[in-house]
Amino acid sequence: MKKCLAVLLVAGLSLSMVACGGKEEKKAKATTTAATTEATTQAETQAETQAATEATTQAEGTTAATTEATTEAAGENSYAAATMASDDVVKAYATQVQNAVIAYDWSQFGDMIQYPITIDGNTVNNKDELVNLFNSHTISTDFVSAVGQPDVPDNLFANGQGICLADGNIWITDQSFDGISENGDPSFKVFAINGILAD
């Protein structure tokens, strides 16, 4: 009987150890499963974040390329304070003004003026008066030399008043910028001339 009890006791202990070992094994499996799930979730989150970042970077690159293409198509506008015209259009007009001055072509220059205009204290109402004024006075060689410098069309300055040539010797306005031009194209005119008369 004692022998039977001893066998039963040993068998009971063995079962209880097996049962305890089973619980520990289940706990270990549960912990491993939870850790694996968390690692998978983190990996998926990282992959999603990386994909989103790549998509954003790609979108930003596309936007930058579109902006650059639009700017190239429209032309740069360094003189936006005074005109919506591109730099090339502004420089082309400045070159026309420059050429008329260095050629002493007052008839052509007269077509570029916004009248009435005051030139070195003389009020001029139209092209004929301008041509007569310039033909009856000595033109400043310093003025012509300053306006005639090769880099003048590339070194223009613009503010709310207009576009400046040769450090303020000539100022140009875009009449279309203020809604004066009917079709909205640039309508450049010289509105100020400073120091052209030597006498």
Image (spheres, rainbow, N blue to C red):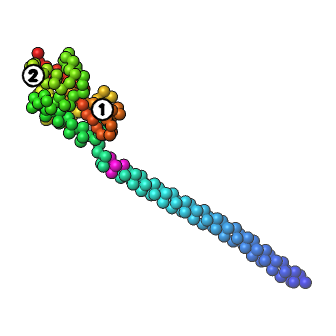
Residue 91 included in the magenta stretch of the image: no
Residue 21 falls in image quadrant: bottom right
Residue 175 image label = 1
- Disc 1 marks a residue whose amino acid type is Gln
Q: In front here: 187 or 199?
A: 187
Q: In front here: 171 or 5?
A: 171
Residue 78 falls in image quadrant: top left
Query: Which region shows up in magenta?
Result: 67-71
- Residue 143 visible? The answer is no
Kindly report the distance in space between the C-alpha atoms of the residues bearing marks 2 and 1. Answer: 28 Å
Residue 193, given in percent of the width and then of the height, sits at 20, 24
What residue sits 33% from the left and 51% below the top? 69
Residue at disc 2, secondary structure: helix
- Residue 96 visible? The answer is yes
For disc 2, the marked residue is 135
- Disc 2 marks a residue whose amino acid type is Asn
The answer to whether 139 appears left or right of 187 in the picture is left
